[in-house]
Image: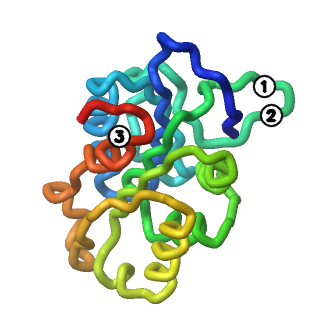
């Protein structure tokens, strides 16, 4: 997972981008590019199902993480200075808020709270999922945990992920005060 560290003065802040499985996940390169343009170093952590949507390893220079390390295996990513969860699915938001840590991505998110790592989430789900009471409670719980929540407006069920309305850069704007990100 992540470990607190003393950052070297000339070292770029390190952003973890947690990617979940949804139709627009393949466009996460837009977020990575925007983060790199803001002088952030980036590593990607995908949910197991989200891994199949990605083809961006060369863009970050780091391996995409999806599984736990084995004992004694070195850490492939530096510790996170901030975390952006985008796109975040109904499943991930609800498990995270409930403290379920059954994947590497969720383990990192659950641990980030206790470590004080600034975290922002940009959900991507449909309006039927967003109407579920568990989702509303989960967003409230994440707010209580000081997670910054983006403004994505849910799309119609069975209509696709609304890629044209998804503002990848919003998570960077939310995190800007915490990691000195130029917007």
Badge 1 marks a residue whose secondary structure is: loop
Q: Earlier in the sequence, mark 2 or mark 3?
A: 2
Residue at 38 percent of width and 61 percent of height: 149
From the image, tell me which residue sits under label 3: 176
Q: What is the C-alpha distance between the residues marked 2 and 3? A: 34 Å
Contact check, label 2 and label 3, Cβ < 8 Å: no
Seen in the picture, residue 119 relative to 8 is either above or below; the reply is below
Point out residue 81 in the picture as x, y percentages from the top left corner: 53, 34
| Residue reaching furthest to the left | 164
Nearer to me, 17 or 179: 179
Nearer to me, 75 or 84: 84
Point out residue 159 in the picture as x, y percentages from the top left corner: 20, 72
Badge 3: residue crowd in 10 Å (few <14, some 14–19, many ≥20): some
Q: Earlier in the sequence, mark 1 or mark 3?
A: 1
Mark 1 or mark 3, which is nearer to you?
Answer: 3
Residue 29 visible in this rendered orientation of the protein: yes
Residue at 33 percent of width and 63 percent of height: 124
Residue 52 visible in this rendered orientation of the protein: no
Q: Quadrant of the N terminus?
A: top right
Q: Is residue 6 left or right of residue 173?
A: right
Badge 2: residue crowd in 10 Å (few <14, some 14–19, many ≥20): few
Seen in the picture, residue 80 relative to 153 is either above or below; the reply is above
Q: Is residue 84 left or right of residue 158?
A: right
Badge 3 marks a residue whose secondary structure is: helix
From the image, tell me which residue sits under label 2: 70
Mark 2 or mark 3, which is nearer to you?
Answer: 3
Nearer to me, 45 or 37: 37
Seen in the picture, residue 2 relative to 94 is either above or below; the reply is above
Q: Which mark is residue 73?
A: 1
């Amino acid at each position: 997972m992540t470990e607190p560290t003393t950052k070297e003065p000339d070292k770029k802040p390190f952003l973890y981008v947690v990617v979940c499985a949804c139709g627009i996940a393949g466009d996460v390169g837009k977020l990575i590019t925007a983060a790199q343009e803001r002088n952030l170093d980036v590593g990607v952590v995908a949910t197991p199902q989200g891994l199949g949507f990605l083809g961006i390893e060369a863009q970050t220079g780091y391996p995409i993480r999806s599984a736990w390390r084995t004992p004694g295996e070195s850490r492939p990513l530096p510790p996170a200075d901030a975390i952006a969860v985008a796109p975040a699915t109904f499943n991930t938001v609800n498990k995270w808020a409930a403290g379920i840590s059954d994947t590497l991505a969720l383990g990192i998110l659950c641990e980030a709270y206790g470590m004080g790592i600034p975290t922002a989430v940009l959900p991507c789900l449909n309006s039927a999922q967003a109407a579920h009471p568990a989702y509303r409670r989960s967003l409230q719980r994440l707010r209580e945990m000081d997670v910054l929540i983006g403004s994505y407006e849910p799309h119609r069920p069975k209509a696709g992920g609304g890629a044209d309305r998804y503002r990848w850069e919003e998570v960077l704007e939310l995190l800007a005060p915490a990691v000195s990100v130029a917007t």
